[in-house]
Amino acid sequence: MATERRSRNGSRPKPDPHKNGLQVGGYRVVREIETDSLGVIYEAEHPRMQRRVALRTIEPAVARDVSFSRRFLLELRSYVALEHPAIPRLYELAYDGDLPYLVTEMIPGKTLDEVLGSGVRYDPLGIIGLLRPIASALDYAHSRATVHRDLKPANILLANDGRTMLTGFGLGTVASFNTGPGAGGPVAPDYVAPERLVGREVDGRADVYSLAAVIFEAVTGRRPFSSKSWIETLSRRLYEPPPTVHDVAPDLSGQFAAVLQAAMDRDPNRRPATAGELLDRLEDALVHPQGGGEPRNWLQPAMHRGSIGLSALLVLLVGAAEAAWLLDGTGLSLLVKLTHQIFGR
């Protein structure tokens, strides 16, 4: 007998689609993937398309807001126009009665949120390699006047086929209408730029802030503003200066820490202008640290912590940062040998 699964926000899940023949807008629901505070995500199939898709519904209580409906449609229309290899395709945006839903490309994999371990630090160069497609997708979207607004590990997909994908486009507007301690994550302020939390209009630099917060967590094992409560996190985000990775990881270079801290500055004008610029500056800080001398062997600290984390060298050698990120010691001796051969150490 199947056990009942509760959603992250504590609500009961929808009825079993197999028992009830659930359909949404002509799509046959195969299974429920997840329930969150915005609605439900299903794996579904259209009888004519003969293709499995991801179908997200939006709760009617959220959708009934007139302002929401207008902005939601505008956001999703911008999403339809995006064509980038790291952005899942949007097939349809429609209503089933008063229930809005959107249908996107179904990509099997795990989210970065599912993979990141609390307290686990990953190699900074490897993280940068892993997130290159995400930065490219953000810069592409920003060049077309589209801001993601909800960049977080749960919206970064590590696909089974090796791709790193950015999901959640268009849903940042939904989160704007569903804030507070019970929001269950969509707008919990762990990664959201301060200007968005106070309702100001945002541009691409808000996504740069969020990307920096994701990197901060990956390289330190902690979120930038770790607090006991939602409201304390919100207050720290709005009124405290941005944190530095040196507070948690003093082994990282001062230049790297300074770049990451600037990217989380409360003033958007002080942040790197683009996501790609942020990654370039962080990588340069690691490869060419200030003070001269040879760059340190960035594999060593990760090995000292009991895990090699991510291997940027493997990214350069085989162009597979996503696969290298999941290594847990396999091939380490080969990587060290190749490093010695390439750098003459």
Image: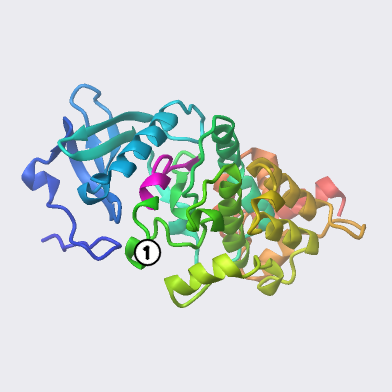
The reply to whether residue 72 is visible in this rendering is yes
State the residue lying farthest toward the right: 292
In the image, the segment drawn in magenta is: 165-175
The reply to whether residue 224 is visible in this rendering is no
Decide: is 77 above or below 199: above
Residue 47: image x %, image y %?
18, 25
Does residue 112 appear to the left or right of 211 in the view shown? left
Instruction: Assign a secondary structure to mark 1.
Output: loop
Task: Tell me which residue sits at (37%, 31%) in the image.
Answer: 90
Residue 129: image x %, image y %?
64, 46
Q: Which residue is labeled 1 in the image?
A: 180
Decide: is 342 above or below 4: above
Residue 12: image x %, image y %?
18, 61
**Between 148 and 223, the one nearer to me in the picture:** 148
Does residue 232 appear to the left or right of 318 in the view shown? left
Asked whether residue 194 is drawn in magenta, I would say no
In which quadrant is the N terminus drawn? Answer: bottom left
